[in-house]
Image (spheres, helix red, strand yellow):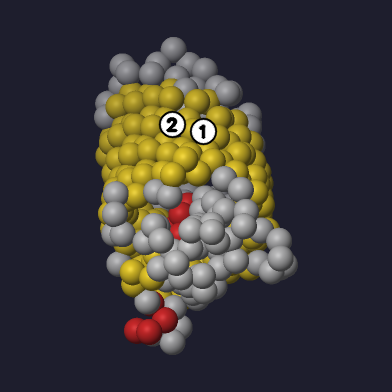
Amino acid sequence: MLRSILYLFFVCTVIFAYDDVDFDGVIDQKDRCPATPITDLIDQHGCSIVKIMDADPVASHYDVILGIAYDSADYGTSREFKTVTNTFQADLFLDSWSAQFYTSYYSLDVEGSSNSKGFNDTSVSVYYNYRPFNEENLFLRFGLGATVPTQKSSYNEVDYTASFTASYIAQNYSLFCGYGYTVVGDEDTDYFKFQNTSSFNFGLGYYLKANIYTSLSYLNADSVIQEIEKIRNLSLYLFYGVNDNWFFTLSYSKGLTDATSDLSSNLRVGYYF
């Protein structure tokens, strides 16, 4: 069970059983190892497969994730925009802290126009995970990040983001929500003005099995351009853990405004070290 990985994707994608003293996802009545450290990888009996703390006094581990995404939209125009994006993500976990590196390369096809390719902006983020009440399944996550302008543009500058997410676990269900605020450093042009943005999301998740998790969520976010309406979508997410190392994620989003992609899908494969 990849508890730390799941926690990163949706602060509370790991669903612990209600009667579970060591919070390893195996109910106490079936747990053969009732005091498993939270940082360990465990088997279906609740016993450690990998004892991270034995190798490092500060629990550390990491993952690498490759993905491909497809987006289709008309943005309220008569032309269709199709984008294929290849993504790379690396995560590092150090006890309650985690760090993330994310970059991507896109190929854009605009109907009736020339195609374009190149790197999107690259982001680096740091997170702190906190559980305020030991007797309650409430989990909080605070994040700070910077988006570096690796996409070629004359007005592109560094952006800074602060985020907060919270989730509450009850049996196999997870209620989660999040808020983010971005200070946009891009310079205004003659055609449009940039603005700082805020976003929030909320949703419901369910743990089908020890290695299968799914969720449905809603996103509402400002556009970085003042004249463009808000971004709103509904997303369906699925996590499947193949074994103790390999895992897949699949997401599908439906846009609810003209400023949002009509259709967006994302398939990723990751390896947990």
Task: Give the residue type at disc 2.
Answer: Tyr
From mark 2 to mark 1, how far is it between C-alphas? 6 Å
Q: Quadrant of residue 63?
A: bottom left
Q: Are marks 2 and 1 in contact (CB under 8 Å)?
A: yes
The answer to whether one can see residue 42 in this image is yes
Q: Name the image quarter holding the C terminus.
A: bottom left
Q: Where is residue 66 drawn, in percent x and y?
A: 29, 50
Q: Position of residue 59 (x, y in %)?
A: 44, 78
Q: Residues within 10 Å of mark 2 (few under 14, many from 20)?
A: some
- Give the camera-side residue of 199 and 63: 63
Q: Nearer the viewer, residue 139 or 23?
A: 23
Image mark for residue 235 = 1
Secondary structure beneath dot 2 equals strand
Q: Nearer the viewer, residue 85 or 4?
A: 4
The quadrant of the rendering that contains the N terminus is bottom left
Count the marks.
2
Three-letter amino acid code at the position of disc 1: Ser
Residue linked to disc 2: 252
